[in-house]
Image: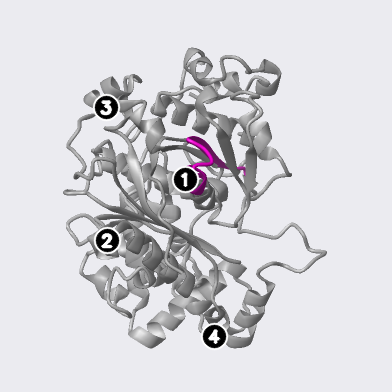
Amino acid sequence: MAPKKRSPAYVVGVGMTKFIKPRGKVDYTELGFEAGVKALLDAQINYDDVEQGVACYCYGDSTCGQRVFYQFGMTQIPIYNVNNNCSTGSTGLAMARQLVSSGAADCVMVVGFEKMMPGSLQSFFNDRENPVGTTHRMMAETRGVTNAPGAAQMFGNAGIEYMEKYGARPEDFAEIARVNHAHSPKNPYSQFTDVYSLEQIMKAPAIHGPLTKLQCCPTSDGGAAAIVVSQEFLDARPHLKEQAVEIAGQCLATDAPSLFSKSSIDLMGYEMTQHAMRTATREAGVSPRDCQVVELHDCFSANEMVVIDALELCDKGKAHELVRRGDITYGGKYVINPSGGLISKGHPLGATGIAQCAELVWHLRGWANNRKVPRTKHCLQHNLGLGGAAVVTVYRRADGQEAPEMDSATVGRKNGLGYNPAVEAKGFTQAQATSVRSRAKANDWALQDTEKKVEARF
């Protein structure tokens, strides 16, 4: 069946918190509120303009989304709570785009947040079948089981297979991590900003297969938000057109039967990533190789290697050659994960996909001037969740032009905030928070001092 024609959808506002170690110091209500206020300020709208809300999180009780959204106002709009493993945030974005493109809403707010536990990912429901239980059993039958964390084993096995089939070496995976760590100091929201040599990464504690500790993403607390609007909404606010970024193509895909082909690469969702990429790029009318900036799901360096291949940023089996040529960083063919990626920026599951979106929006606006990629016209986003879901999105400016050159003083004047949020992480004043909360249906009981707690952190 041919894809149906969609009405345009645009991202006009983004905002995020700094990603931090999960130590229980900041609650999800604060993370969601901070990100949401920043996105509303960025979009220069009030919460009363929002017609539907999508809340994205994995760890938390049902209706955490309402608890976060009620802080902006109790306007009785539909609020959906989304949980799709590590692709939760981009799943929320896909929902928002679908709502807007179908005509169900003109303005949808997506807020992702996560308050995590320290250490590796774990299941909390041990009295029932694990949704990735069949994936674990396939891994056990084909590669065996070690004492390493389960996710590291699965993605590490994909790295082992990539070495076996295509000739990649352990240092190729370490180079991916080296690049991501090198990118992160220019992202003010990164959890980690340390830079490492290739030798340091390779000599870090071994985890599984080619993976060392510095090639694995951390668990994180954090929040991110985006405002997605229709053409009609944008046309009514022409002052936003310069900063609007079109979702030119997008696909949320799930697994194919190849998941259980007994290949460790296929077991990590290779085909669903490839299908999502081909669908999204076809809709956008571009090739993945037309994209200059890529934010992809590097939960482990091994997954970045496999995803580069699945996204067809190189010929099949040649991802390691792309890495060796320096074509994943500045001066090369692409800049992959200029944010630092999950490995260095952090990975609060519900916020990750939206944070990727924010990074790419800032690049297309020209705001990410301290990590600018020349001649940026199309950006590619990939977000993966085992179980499974993969979301691939192609972004371009609403005017279809290359990202302009823009200094931070100009950004601060244009957005009315006095600073550039792409290069500086700041909070907001109580007056700013009040300005974006519902004028008619805000209730301070729903806020419970969140405003003051957020202000105190800055």
- Sequence order check, earlier mark of 2 and 3: 2
Identified by mark 4, the residue type is: Ser
Question: How would you rate the neighbour count of disc 2 (Cα within 10 Å): few for under 14, some for 14-19, many for 20 or more?
Answer: some
Asked if disc 1 and disc 2 are in contact, CB closer than 8 Å, the reply is: no
User: Rounded to the nearest whole Å, what is the CA distance between mark 3 and mark 4?
Assistant: 50 Å
Q: Nearer the viewer, mark 2 or mark 3?
A: 2
Nearer to us: label 1 or label 2 = 2
**Circle 3 is placed at which residue position?**
411
Mark 4, secondary structure of its residue = loop
111 is within the stretch colored magenta:
yes
Q: Which residue is mark 1?
A: 354
| Residue 346 visible in the displayed image | no
Task: Please state the horizontal and vertical placement of residue 396, each as a whole percent of the image.
Answer: 29, 47
Pick out the residue farthest to the right.
127
Of marks 2 and 4, which one's residue comes earlier in the chain? 4
Q: Marks 4/1: CA distance? A: 32 Å
Amino acid type of the residue tagged 2 in the rendering: Val
Could you tell me residue 191's position as x and y percent? Answer: 46, 44
Q: Earlier in the sequence, mark 4 or mark 1?
A: 4
> On the rendered structure, is 324 left or right of 102?
left
Q: Farthest top residue?
A: 431
Q: Which residue is mark 2?
A: 286
Question: The residue tagged with tag 3: helix, strand or loop?
Answer: helix
Say whether residue 428 is visible: yes
Give the amino acid at mark 3. Val
**Is 295 placed above or below 11 here?**
below
* Crowd around label 1: few <14 · some 14–19 · many ≥20 (10 Å): many
Q: Are marks 3 and 4 in contact (CB under 8 Å)?
A: no
Gap in Å between the C-alphas at discs 2 and 4?
30 Å
The residue carrying mark 4 is 261
For the residue carrying disc 4, how many other residues have a C-alpha within 10 Å: few (<14), some (14-19), or many (20+)? few
Q: Which residues are magenta?
A: 96-115
